Image (cartoon, rainbow, N blue to C red):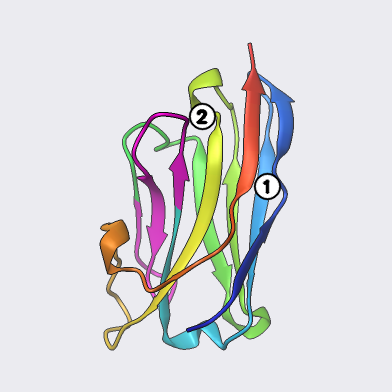
Amino acid sequence: QVQLVESGGGLVQAGGSLSLSCVSSGRTFTFAMGWFRQAPGKERELVAAISRSGATTKYSDSVKGRFTISRDTAKNMLYLQMNNLKPEDTAVYYCAANVVAHIALTITDPGQYASWGQGTQVTVSS
């Protein structure tokens, strides 16, 4: 199991932008990875997922067109660029990873991820 550490969260006004980063202790070229979020009183939900190759991505409908997931395998990094943030984006954001064989596979079910970061808080004020 690898260690994942997120950074980049904070407080921003509605309409603003934030960029989240996640560094892995293991080499990420074997991992499908994803960003999830959890607001108080709600279940953890998918934000975006990316395949090993980085060529395949999936987004939740609520963030499509505003958020972009990307990765730098050489640096063992995962990123989430968040633009046009809304108050409903307020949550703790988590990075997740799991070893997969297929380079184009994305994982959208949080139950299929073996490794998780500790989370970073994102707060969007109205």
Name the residue that disc number 2 marks. Answer: 89
> Crowdedness of circle 1 by 10 Å Cα count: few (<14), some, many (20+)?
some
Q: Residues within 10 Å of mark 2 (few under 14, many from 20)?
A: many
Residue positioned 34% across, 39% down in the render: 43
Residue type marked 2: Asp
Q: Secondary structure at mark 2?
A: helix
The picture places residue 22, in percent across and down from the top left corner, at: 63, 64
Judging by the rendered image, the residue that carries numbered circle 1 is 19
**Residue 68 pos. (x, y %):** 51, 49
Name which residue lies at 56% across and 63% down.
117
Residue 95: % across, % down: 52, 60
Query: Looking at the image, is mark 2 or mark 1 nearer the viewer?
Result: 2
Whether residue 64 appears in magenta in the rendering, the answer is no
* Image quarter of residue 106: bottom left
The image quadrant of residue 42 is top left
Question: What's the residue at 64%, 84% (across, down)?
Answer: 74
Q: Quadrant of residue 108?
A: bottom left
Above/below status of 125 relative to 81: above
Q: Residue at x 68, y 47 (%)?
A: 19
User: Does residue 43 lie above or below 103 as drawn?
Assistant: above
Looking at the rendering, the stretch of residues picked out in magenta corresponds to 36-58
Question: Of 77 and 10, which appears nearest the observer?
Answer: 10
Q: Would you say 41 lies left or right of 106 here?
A: right
Judged from this view, the residue extending furthest toward the front is: 41
